[in-house]
Image: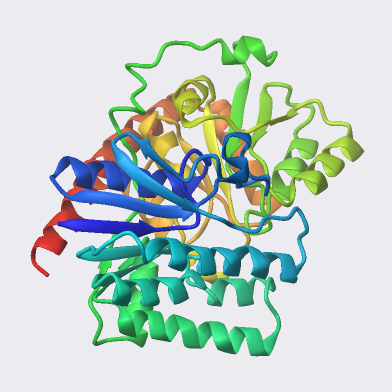
Amino acid sequence: MKILFLTQYYPPEIGAPQNRLHELAVRLKSKGIQIEVLTALPNYPKMEIFEAYKKNKISREEIEGITVHRSWIYVSKSKSILSRLLNYFSFVWSSYWKGRKLGNFDYLLVESPPLFLGYSAIALSKKLDSKLIFNVSDLWPESAEKLGLVTNKHLLKLAYNLEKKCYQKAALITGQTQGIVDDIKNRFPNKKVVWLPNGVDVSFYDPQKIEDTGFRNTHGFNADDLIFFYGGILGYAQGLEIIIEVAKKLKEHTKAQFVIQGSGPEKEKLVALYQKYKLKNVHFLEPVQKSQMPGILKAVDVALVPLKKLDLFKGAIPSKIFEALAMKKPLLLGVDGEARKHFIDRAKSGLYYTPEDLTSLEQQILFLLNEPEERKKMGENAREYVTAIFDRNKIAQGLYDELQNM
């Protein structure tokens, strides 16, 4: 069996889709499936082609035994809608012309968003005689419309029509959350839709195997500080201003320290707010390679996961949750719906606060500051739950079995 992964994002870029797709590819390969990846020249999140890949120096490479083909993409630091569209459609165009030369595959698995990559996926699946697997990690354009990121009615109409076409052409649709799966099933009841969640490598994120990296000393934290950690994209959807605001309210509680690690379009605004308040309990760190994350997570105390208060996010499960829980870190979750049901109600692995509610967040932080035994119990529950439900090996096995039956 041969499968081509088509995705705009892939390692060495750092991010949730990059890690998720590569981990899936490696595991499917271990089962005897020939996996190849067609992706863009790496540029995310700084929107600048990585130095080693400039001028197409690397257009084909091997990453952990996976053959990766790279095609050109337009990148710009501009945040205008035109620049974003040029970014998406340049890879749509280049991926098709690169992919049509790769030979036939049994399946073509395309990652959405960006939804526009569906144009290339549909054309390539026909050209390469492949069955199309449409993998949905975010309901686009619905999420873009509700977040106010896309307001042009003509563009939205085109996007909804493309979404419908992609689902209709797919032999299999996979959704990252049950909410996504249910939404698509309700709208397209005749299509095969299965749950393909994100997950975690529980052998890599294992607190028993990770030694102290000196993270706390390096960054000036005291042994009795309680570090509330956010790591990931600093974007609009996360509503990260609430971390700065709660840090301001708790600045007299010197044991409460807040770390925000990552980069993204909202970083300048967040740093400006932090500087305005002259806070000493907020610390901004640059993103790091995946290999460093277990050591960082072992050193912090609580994983803080916020999102904006939108009905759209009731089906969301931010990927940063899994690694933290595997490392036995209790969760402070500002996401209602599916994530809350899994990790708060069922797993008892943390506390929930009402999204964008500063008072609610403050109360839960104060509880965690004063209840070390509860924190420890939540951490134990956390690893047990993700090992049972969100182990990447089990997830890959589920997709493998699905493909064998198609």
Q: Which of the 4 quarters of the picture holds residue 183? A: bottom left
**Residue that lies at the very extreme toward the right in this rendered image:** 276
Relative placement, left or right, of 148 versus 199 is right
Q: Is residue 346 above or below residue 140?
A: above
Counting from the top left corner in percent of width and height, residue 281 is at 75, 27
Q: Colour scheme used in the picture?
A: rainbow
- Measuring from the top left, give residue 386's x and y in whole percent: 30, 41
Taking the spot 57% from the left edge, 35% from the top edge, the residue there is 367
Name the spot of residue 121 as percent of width and height, x first: 39, 71
Position of 309 compared to 380: left or right?
right
Q: Is residue 389 above or below residue 110?
A: above
Q: Residue furthest left?
A: 405
Q: Quadrant of the N terminus?
A: bottom left
- Decide which of 213, 114 is in the foreground and name it: 114
- The answer to whether residue 58 is left or right of residue 156 is left
Q: Is residue 199 above or below residue 185?
A: above
Location of the C terminus by quadrant is bottom left
* Residue depicted at 62% across the width and 77% down the height: 145
Q: At 57% from the left edge and 30% from the top edge, which residue is drawn?
A: 288
The residue depicted at 34 percent of the width and 40 percent of the height is 200
Task: Look at the image and tell me whether residue 8 can be seen.
Answer: yes
From this viewpoint, is residue 173 visible?
A: no
Vertical side of 143 occupied by 22: above or below:
above
User: How many discs appear?
Assistant: 0
What percent of the width, then of the height, locates residue 297? 49, 27
